Image (cartoon, rainbow, N blue to C red):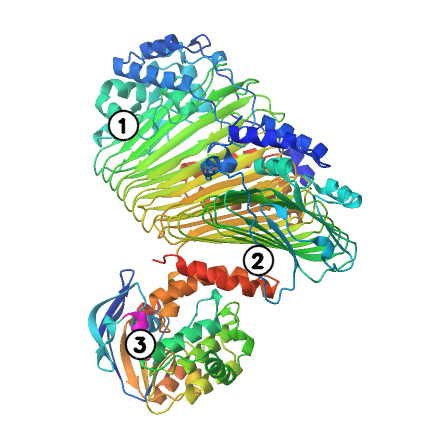
């Protein structure tokens, strides 16, 4: 029966279409001129360009990390185009009516209608297409509450003080190879600021789409939740089905001031490549948040896409009593490789962190959890609980766990547990005997396995995530 | 190429004995090896600076071989001082089925056994294993005939003295259906280096009871390992006890090469002052139907630092494997440090694998229970802390050894600062 | 012996005891009954000094001293013994080592010499016999892998060895079959000497068939709502806790 599962795990990728949109794309290659041109395209102030150039110079001195449990051919950074934008975006459309209808159709096909009246109530969307933000919805409603939600390129102009104050404070320019690259060439992304004491009136969401060939996507997101505020932010992403690998190297920085709360959810569905490992996105992402006193940051991710994933959404628990959470489902199949997890850095007293990671491996894929829990000498009474479960479907895949625990405080408690299990023939037999088809049975078992994580997702996303897994496993068993 | 490795290579090349041909490969590997820094995963938490700074003296004054008997153990003692065998094996009466010879003076038959073991079980990735390959001129070859059950434990002790280095090698082959107990003990306090490596080939249905006591303290640097290959239905019960010195590191590999083998590995480390102890264990399930259970427990006080890396690797097709690893640590001091990483790498789906690691305090509930019976808080802490280690001491199959070890651990523990 | 006045206490900000009064004289056996969640076990924990319980009002006098001011171990040394409902398992610490340490702490309190290993072993063996625990239980880790009944008997064995003045038995009958129940009851009865006092906390009346109480108190919603003699327990057995009234019962159950 395992063979049946295995065979059929070649799933279709619904978001694999290409939109026919005329784009302005830089020629491939990267040097200081390219960075100057990106900066000029965005009409950036001098300080921003300077920041980028510094990042670029430190990137040149760095080496691509090789410690992750993933293998891919060496990336030629000179064979990538670092900027691509729909031509129609050149003169910024003032309203949705001026946006290229083909663009709107693209998002509709992806299930993200951008006309406010058609949207899910209570979700504001920033749509990023290749290197630029296409449209941000519900802005006036958010402005009433004092919430800033706009493309980061716009924030650089409109809120330079805020951007200057926080950009690069959580993920420094030269934090790692991919973060440095991003700092040099990032093109767009979202900026969010929630003022003191404000509970953001709706879910904020960014939808990333790579369309153009041979381009990389380097978006940068910065979310600042001021004292006592709350925001829930969702992120989705897709890309067309192409034979070449494409690089996505994003940086996300979260700042949760005293008593603030940020909930950050991701459904990552970049094109994973075909069953033979041809094509797909390299998803090399740096996500990190800092928690001040009594603050809380919660990362939830459902990772089903990308050919290679390298991603560790982390929390620096700097303030006393701050809380970090990481809930993750990572599904790999075909030839996908994922090395994902989190870092919880406990610096303050009575800081708490929870890590729940569910890895599902199928086909010939490899799925690794990599995490770090660090208890600093001043983290009196700090607590961590980690649970990593792996589910293997078929006997050609791999499931791995690499948890690093470093403790320097006698009153801190760290607990880590990891288990593996499989979808057994017995379970399948039982389900079939009760009249379920095997496909449904696997989907049920997988969904049950992921329940703890799904329940952390906002409602709309939970449904989407469930569906995504179902599609992923569709036709998986006969 | 580091200076340190270069001198090892130079010395190794100069050695001309019957093992020279087998050393060649290790020499070649060493020539290709970079001196590890903290970016090398295997040495992430352990610095080799103390080794680089170690000054050895050229004049060797072998002191007397002062090894205390263990009451009730009735062991066959093989005593090394600075890596050189002092015991006269020819004068020993060995039980039937047990053959022991020194590496230096091995007879032809023993040489054949040794060549079949030397560097055949120990994986090539251990840098200091290669160093030992190149420099080990002395050691013992233990060969147990099939169906022989050796009652008397074999105890191999190496003493490191001031300014000396020792690179001895232990090679043990258990014939099918045989059984034996081997105790490896290393000791030393003064500035010295020892790289003791042992390789065990456990035959079909054979049973090995094994102890490794890495009791180096203070300035005595120890970097060694023990490596086991389990054939079909083999049984291994191994206990490791680690003290800490300025640099003490042990690598253990348990490799299931035959189906239906069972391994149990317990490790205890108890560190105080500025001691450093690093245990890297790797469980390889290369074939189906194997079972491994590993329990490692450590207590770290004062400014000591413990490193544990426990890897379980289930190869493709090693179905029906059962492997569990549990690492628990108590950190007693604000200046101490515990770094632990249990790893799972799994390529087969029909397996039961789990690992857990904790760094914790004594359970409040247990403390309350003891206090509610009139025991003071500080006394209760001592009892509970030691109880944590005691559990594994109690599991040692050899009672005489457990009785000998217990007060030693207790004394060590008493010297540690309990908050 | 023990006088509890207007005791208010909470755990995790939940108000559990709301003005409890109790007066226990030497040699008396008091049974405390009540529905689940009435605060019965909380009472035992507070008297023994468990951390995490906050007393906001009231006083507890134990043999002329303020009990609430004492450390956990000092309460024990002055003769207060709590037999736990769910004793914790402590692998690695043997029962023998544990009890020897404990007995000698009591002796030190009384100004007596510590017992030698042989003297202690003799006493421990006797105690084991009395509660029908096999001798090898002394060598095993404290409560490690013991069945529910064995744990209860181990608690009783400790009580016999420590010779306390006030024994609090927290649901010592729960989960026991009739034979085990009798062992526990006999153990308790053997310790009744006219001076030693007992608080028997139980949900059911059946233990009281074997340990005849002098007084029975019904605890509901954090205070004693009814007191009487042994016949009160029989009444509860027949009528249940319904007589507490709907409000009380619900609140107590919540």
Q: Which residues are magenta?
A: C71-80
Residue ID for mark 2: B67
Q: Which mark is residue C219?
A: 3
Q: Disc 2 on helix, strand or loop?
A: loop
Instruction: Mark 1 and mark 3 in contact? Answer it, CB < 8 Å.
Output: no
Direction from residue B152 to residue A219 in the image, left or right: left
**Location of the C terminus of chain A (image quadrant):** top right
Which callout, 1 or 3, points to the residue nearer the camera?
1
Residue ID for mark 1: A166
Question: Is residue B45 part of the magenta span, yes or no?
Answer: no
Vertical placement of A404 versus C91: above or below?
Answer: above
Number of numbered markers: 3
- Residue A35 location (% of width, % of height): 37, 12
Is B132 in front, or is C114? B132
- Residue A76 location (% of width, % of height): 51, 15
Query: In percent of the image, x 36 and y 30: which residue is there?
Result: A205
């Amino acid at each position: 029966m395992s063979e049946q599962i295995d065979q059929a795990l070649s799933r279709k990728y619904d978001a694999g279409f290409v939109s026919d949109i005329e784009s302005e794309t830089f020629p491939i290659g990267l040097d200081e001129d390219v960075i100057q041109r990106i900066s000029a395209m965005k009409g950036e102030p001098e300080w921003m360009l300077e920041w980028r150039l510094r990042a670029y110079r430190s990137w040149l001195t760095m080496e691509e990390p090789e410690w992750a449990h993933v293998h891919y051919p060496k990336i030629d950074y000179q064979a990538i185009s670092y900027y691509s934008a729909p031509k129609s975006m050149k003169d910024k459309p003032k309203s949705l009516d001026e946006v290229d209808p083909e663009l709107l159709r693209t998002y509709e096909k992806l299930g993200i209608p951008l006309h406010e009246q058609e949207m899910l109530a209570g979700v504001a969307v920033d749509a990023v297409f290749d290197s630029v933000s296409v449209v941000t919805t519900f802005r006036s409603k958010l402005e009433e509450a004092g919430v800033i939600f706009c493309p980061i390129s716009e924030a650089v102009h409109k809120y330079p003080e805020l951007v200057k104050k926080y950009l690069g404070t959580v993920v420094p320019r030269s934090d790692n190879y991919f973060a440095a690259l991003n700092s040099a060439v990032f093109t767009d992304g979202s900026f969010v600021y929630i003022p003191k004491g404000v509970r953001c009136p709706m879910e904020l969401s960014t939808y990333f789409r790579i369309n153009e060939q041979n381009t990389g996507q380097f978006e940068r997101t910065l979310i600042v939740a001021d004292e006592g505020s709350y925001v829930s932010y969702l992120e989705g992403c897709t890309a067309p089905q192409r034979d070449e690998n494409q690089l996505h190297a994003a940086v996300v920085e979260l700042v949760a001031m005293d008593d603030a709360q940020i909930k950050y959810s991701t459904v990552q569905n970049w094109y994973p490549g075909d069953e033979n490992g041809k094509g797909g996105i390299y998803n090399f992402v740096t996500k990190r948040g800092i928690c001040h006193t009594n603050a809380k940051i919660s990362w939830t991710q459902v990772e089903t896409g990308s050919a290679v994933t390298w991603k560790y959404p982390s929390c620096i628990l700097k303030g006393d009593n701050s809380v970090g959470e990481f809930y993750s489902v990572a599904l790999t199949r075909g030839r996908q490789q994922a090395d994902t997890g989190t870092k919880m850095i406990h610096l303050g007293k009575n800081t708490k962190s929870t890590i729940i990671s569910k890895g599902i491996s199928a086909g010939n894929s490899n799925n690794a959890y990599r995490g770090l829990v660090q208890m600093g000498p001043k983290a009196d009474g700090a607590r961590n609980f980690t649970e990593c479960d792996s589910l293997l479907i078929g006997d050609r895949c791999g499931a791995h766990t690499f948890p690093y625990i470093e403790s320097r405080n006698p009153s801190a408690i760290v607990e880590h547990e990891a288990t593996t299990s499989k979808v057994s023939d017995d379970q399948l037999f039982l389900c079939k005997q009760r009249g379920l088809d095997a496909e449904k049975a696997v989907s049920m078992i997988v969904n049950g396995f992921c329940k703890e994580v799904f329940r952390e997702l906002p409602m709309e996303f939970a449904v989407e995530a469930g569906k995504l897994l179902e599609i992923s496993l569709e036709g998986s068993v006969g | 190429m580091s200076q340190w490795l270069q001198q090892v290579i130079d010395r190794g090349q100069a050695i001309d004995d019957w093992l020279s041909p087998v050393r060649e490969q290790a020499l070649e590997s060493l020539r290709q090896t970079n001196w590890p820094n903290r970016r090398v995963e295997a040495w992430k938490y352990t610095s080799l600076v103390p080794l680089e700074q170690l000054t050895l003296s050229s004049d060797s004054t072998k002191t007397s071989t002062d090894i205390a008997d263990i009451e009730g153990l009735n062991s066959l003692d093989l005593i090394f001082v600075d890596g050189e065998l002092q015991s006269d094996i020819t004068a020993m009466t060995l039980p039937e089925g047990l053959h022991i010879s020194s590496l230096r003076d091995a007879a032809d038959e023993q040489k054949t056994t040794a060549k079949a073991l030397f560097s055949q079980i120990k994986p090539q990735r251990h840098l200091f294993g290669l160093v030992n390959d190149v420099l080990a001129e002395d050691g013992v070859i233990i060969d147990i005939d099939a169906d022989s059950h050796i009652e008397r434990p074999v105890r191999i002790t190496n003493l490191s003295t001031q300014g000396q280095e020792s690179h001895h090698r232990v090679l043990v082959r258990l014939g099918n259906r045989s059984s034996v107990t081997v105790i490896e003990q290393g000791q030393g306090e003064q500035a010295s280096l020892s790289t003791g490596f042992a390789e065990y080939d456990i035959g079909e249905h054979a049973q090995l009871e094994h102890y490794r006591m890495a009791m180096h303290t203070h300035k005595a640097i120890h970097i060694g390992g023990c490596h086991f290959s389990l054939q079909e239905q083999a049984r291994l019960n191994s206990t490791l006890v680690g003290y800490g010195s300025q640099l003490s590191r042990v690598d253990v590999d348990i490799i299931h090469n035959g189906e239906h083998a069972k391994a149990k590995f317990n490790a205890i480390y108890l560190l105080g002052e500025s001691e450093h102890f690093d245990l890297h264990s790797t469980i390889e399930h290369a074939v189906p139907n194997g079972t491994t259970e590993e329990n490692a427990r450590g207590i770290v006080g004062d400014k000591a630092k413990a490193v544990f890396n426990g890897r379980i690797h289930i190869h493709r097709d090693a179905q029906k494997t059962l492997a569990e690893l549990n690492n628990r640590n108590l950190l007693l001091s604000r200046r101490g440090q515990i770094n632990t990483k249990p790893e799972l790498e799994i390529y087969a789906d029909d397996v039961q694998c789990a690992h857990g690691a904790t760094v914790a305090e004594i359970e409040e509930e247990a403390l309350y229970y003891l206090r509610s019976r009139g025991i003071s808080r500080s006394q209760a802490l001592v009892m509970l802390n030691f109880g944590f280690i005691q559990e594994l001491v109690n599991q040692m199959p050899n009672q005489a050894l457990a009785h000998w070890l217990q007060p030693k651990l207790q004394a060590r523990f008493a010297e540690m600062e309990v908050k | 012996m023990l006088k509890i006045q207007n005791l208010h206490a909470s755990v995790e900000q939940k108000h559990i005891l709301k003005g409890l009064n109790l007066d226990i004289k030497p040699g008396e056996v008091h049974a405390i009954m009540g529905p689940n969640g009435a605060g019965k076990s909380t009472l035992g924990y507070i008297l023994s000094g468990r951390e995490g319980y906050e007393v906001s009002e009231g006083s507890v006098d134990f043999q002329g001293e303020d009990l609430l001011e004492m450390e956990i171990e000092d309460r024990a040394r002055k003769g207060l013994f709590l037999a736990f409902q769910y004793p914790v398992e402590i692998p690695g610490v043997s029962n023998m080592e544990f009890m020897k340490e404990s007995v000698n702490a009591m002796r030190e309190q009384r100004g007596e010499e510590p017992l030698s290993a042989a003297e202690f072993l003799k006493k421990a063996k006797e105690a084991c016999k009395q509660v029908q625990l096999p001798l090898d239980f002394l060598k095993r880790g404290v409560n490690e892998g013991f069945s529910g009944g064995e744990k209860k008997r181990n608690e009783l064995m400790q009580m016999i060895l420590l010779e306390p003045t006030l024994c609090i038995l927290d649901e010592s009958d729960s989960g026991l079959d009739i034979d085990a129940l009798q062992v526990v009851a006999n153990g308790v009865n053997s310790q009744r000497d006219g001076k030693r006092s007992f608080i028997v906390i139980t949900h059911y009346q059946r233990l009281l068939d074997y340990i005849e109480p002098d007084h029975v108190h019904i605890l509901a919603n954090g205070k004693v709502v009814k007191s009487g003699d042994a016949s009160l327990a029989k009444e509860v057995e027949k009528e249940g806790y319904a007589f507490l009234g709907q409000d009380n019962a619900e609140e107590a159950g919540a």
